[in-house]
Amino acid sequence: MKRSLILWIPLAGYLVFLGIASLGLNREQQTVIESRMIGKEIPGIDLPAASSTNPALSTKEMADGKPRLLNIFASWCVPCAAEAPVLAQMAQQGVRIDGVAIRDARADVDAFLARHGDPFQRIGLDARSTLQFYLGSSGVPETFVVDGKGVIRYQHIGAVGPQDVDTLLAKLREAES
Amino acid sequence: MSRALSLLALAPLLALAAPVQAQTALPPAPYADRQLDDPALEAKATALMHTIRCLTCQSQSIADSNASMASDMRSEIRERIARGEEPEAIRGWLIERYGDWISYKPTAEPILWPLWGAPILLLGAGGALAFRRIRHRRKDQS
């Protein structure tokens, strides 16, 4: 009796394995990779100006006492165009927004700003995703809250929708203290 | 003949198309698809690139992916290796930013202890089973 029970153990083990594997197959394949840089000081990188209208961006100058948003975008990125009106509205409310254009060309950034509005104070050109790697950012668009001491306080992944404004404003207020 | 003529007529258009394309498409990063001159360094870089996960195509390594972020990362890694950085230091730099997720090489974190322990446990269990079997058989024979 005991012996025949033992014989079933490999099959049971196999079924457990099969169960776990099939659960894994149904899991969402694309995971959201959050930056591990939240709570750390923003790495100091000098970026050249990405547009003809906005000055260049250096992340070394972010410790100027006031919090801001750092928006990672690109002229070739569709969700970035979708979030543009929301950013414009926030800029109108007095939120300081700096931009980083990823793998972009000046003419394209100019056209993007002309078409979708320009909520940015400074825009840096990150031609080879360097700053993006330093930030632990894994795509466009992403929006970081950087406090007045230059510390990254929050990361929003994906386009900023109207439903995200309150959270971002709250994080900015938190960053003020 | 008429085909050749129409091709000729298209030629100026092609000349126009080239600069327009050049404005929109940024050239890839210098070492995205170019090997390092030193084969030893290139081997180091390639070995590392095969174990770094692409952020865009998440089931591929950056060595296998065509995503532009992966090519930027390949270039970053080759340039760092060329500057004399060690592959494991670069892996550490990436893990510091993206977490263990970015690396295909398993770490020794507590969560992975069952993974490292399983082979030893299974070998032990199998060995014990075989040992008992053999001893039983010997007893039967004698």
Image (tube, coloured by chain):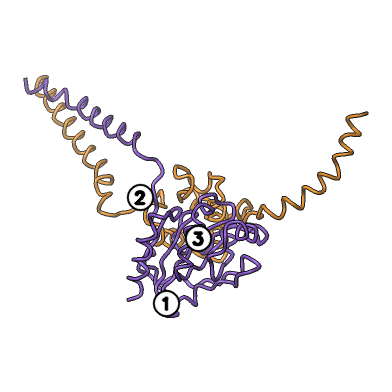
Left or right relative to A127: residue A88? left
Residue that mark 1 sits on: A66
Residue at (64% x, 53% y) in the render: B34
Which quarter of the rendered picture does the C terminus of chain B lie within?
Answer: top left
- 10 Å crowding of disc 2: few (<14), some (14-19), many (20+): few
Please, which chain is the residue tagged with disc 3 on?
A
Q: Do labels 3 and 1 share a chain?
A: yes
Residue that mark 2 sits on: B106
The disc labelled 1 sits on which kind of residue? Lys
Please, which chain is the residue tagged with disc 2 on?
B
- Disc 1 to disc 2, C-alpha distance: 41 Å
Secondary structure of the residue carrying tag 2 is loop
Colour given to chain B in the rendered image: orange
Against A32, residue A56 (above or below) is below
Residue that mark 3 sits on: A72
Secondary structure of the residue carrying tag 3 is strand
- 10 Å crowding of disc 3: few (<14), some (14-19), many (20+): many
